[in-house]
Amino acid sequence: MAGLAAIRFAPTPDSRRRFIVLLTAYVIVTHLIIGVTQKDAWPITNYCLMHGRADLRHAELYRYGFFGVDKDGREWRIDPYAWHSMSDWHLQLWFYIHFAKLSPPDQQQALGWLYGLAEEQRAQLARGDPSISWLGPVSAPQWWMFPRELAVPPEPYRALRVYKDTWFPATIIFDRKPVTRKPVGEWRAR
């Protein structure tokens, strides 16, 4: 605000131009520092803010888990970067709202598409290439906050499985009760 006021009330055009250059440089440098350090600095935030308060005793939380299955039946968690065109957060939300409403053939089509993305990335990771973009680490993906899952089998996945994990924060914190896992869908390679 002070920078904008200085521009507005600058006594000469040269001083106004100087304040504009300084404000522009400040904004660029600030964004670069935040982008490189991956720190939150409101109002420049790198994730969607959530509003409201949760009751830890009664609020059920969930997370969908996506797993590739190898020829021996072992499950490998799919890296969140496999979903090229969307963030893991948006995929979680889509599954929560829409997946159960789809017909079984449409569910299989959606799972088949996700399998294709997961298999494409598995092959890339098996070659030793963990990059998510031709820009490499400067691609600045929106979903940087999710931990990478770089371990993959050398051979193609045979299936994609999706589970819904649910839990109540208070039962995990105070009672040490486990997370409940329920299968949601599976797609098998043909």
Image (cartoon, rainbow, N blue to C red):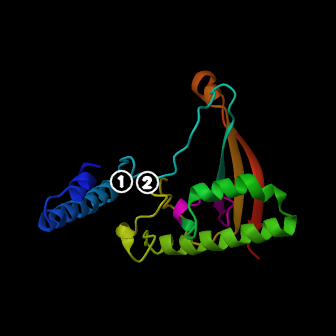
Q: Which residues are magenta?
A: 67-81
Residue 67 image point, x, y percent: 64, 58
Say whether marks 2 and 1 touch (CB < 8 Å). yes
Q: What residue do we see at 61% from left, 72% from top?
A: 117
Observer able to see residue 79: no
Mark found first going from the N terminus, 2 or 1: 1
Side (left or right) of 39 relative to 112: left
Report if residue 113 lies within the magenta region. no
Which label sits in the foreground, 2 or 1? 2
Residue 38 image point, x, y percent: 35, 53
Q: Residues within 10 Å of mark 1 (few under 14, many from 20)?
A: some
Q: What residue do we see at 87% from left, 64% from top?
A: 103
Q: Amino acid at mark 1?
A: Gln
Q: What residue do we see at 68% from left, 32% from top?
A: 59
What numbered label is drawn on residue 2?
A: none
Marks 2 and 1, how far apart at CA: 8 Å
Quadrant assignment, res 173:
top right
Residue at image mark 2: 46
Q: Residues within 10 Å of mark 2 (few under 14, many from 20)?
A: some
* SS class, disc 2: loop
Q: Amino acid at mark 2?
A: Asn
